[in-house]
Amino acid sequence: MKLEDMPKELQRWYSNNKDTASADDLARFELLRTTSSCTATHFHPDEEVAGKLRGQNTAYVDILCNWSVLCEDCQREEDAYWEERWQEYNTGLGLF
Ligand SMILES: [Zn+2]
């Protein structure tokens, strides 16, 4: 997708980091920008499944970690996984 079609958070990451980011980080960004098939290859390793750039329910300081290109099924798995982690986290802090 075009840079201007990307989520604002990622556009901001790019304009702030394009000159200073490592080659690895720029490659990770390009993967998010250009990939159209699900990148959760552990889930369906042999077929190409259409994926979509989606924000994840995570709060990494490394912005790029909070985004993935996933199909509906993998996104559901991810959402369920992070929902549990957050519950553990919040319980650990005694917020429940
Ligand atoms: Zn998938």
Image (cartoon, helix red, strand yellow):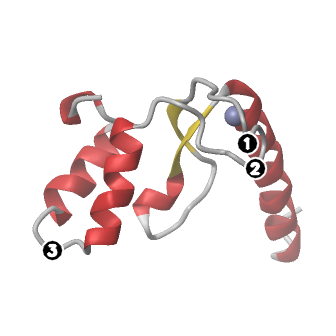
SS for callout 2: loop
Verify CB contact (< 8 Å) between mark 3 and mark 1. no
Residue at 46%, 70% (x, y): give it: 61
Q: Amino acid at mark 2?
A: His
Q: Which mark is residue 20?
A: 3
Q: How far apart in space, not on screen, are marks 2 and 3 (Cα)?
A: 32 Å
Q: Quadrant of ligand 1?
A: top right
SS for callout 1: loop
Residue at 58%, 23% (x, y): give it: 50
Query: In the visual, does 87 lie left or right of 62?
Result: right
Residue 43, position in %: x, y?
78, 42
Q: Which residue is mark 2?
A: 42
Q: Earlier in the sequence, mark 2 or mark 3?
A: 3
Residue at 86%, 75% (x, y): give it: 92
Query: In the visual, does 60 lie left or right of 62?
Result: right
Verify CB contact (< 8 Å) between mark 2 and mark 1. yes
Front-lying residue, 72 or 93: 72
Q: Quadrant of the C terminus?
A: bottom right
Residue 72, position in %: x, y?
69, 25
Q: Which residue is mark 1?
A: 45
For disc 3, does the CB lie below 8 Å from ligand 1?
no
The part of the image, by quadrant, that contains residue 46 is top right
Q: Amino acid at mark 1?
A: Pro
Image vertical order of residue 64 relative to residue 62, above or below: above
Q: Amino acid at mark 3?
A: Thr
Name the front one of labels 2 and 3: 2
For disc 2, does the CB lie below 8 Å from ligand 1?
no
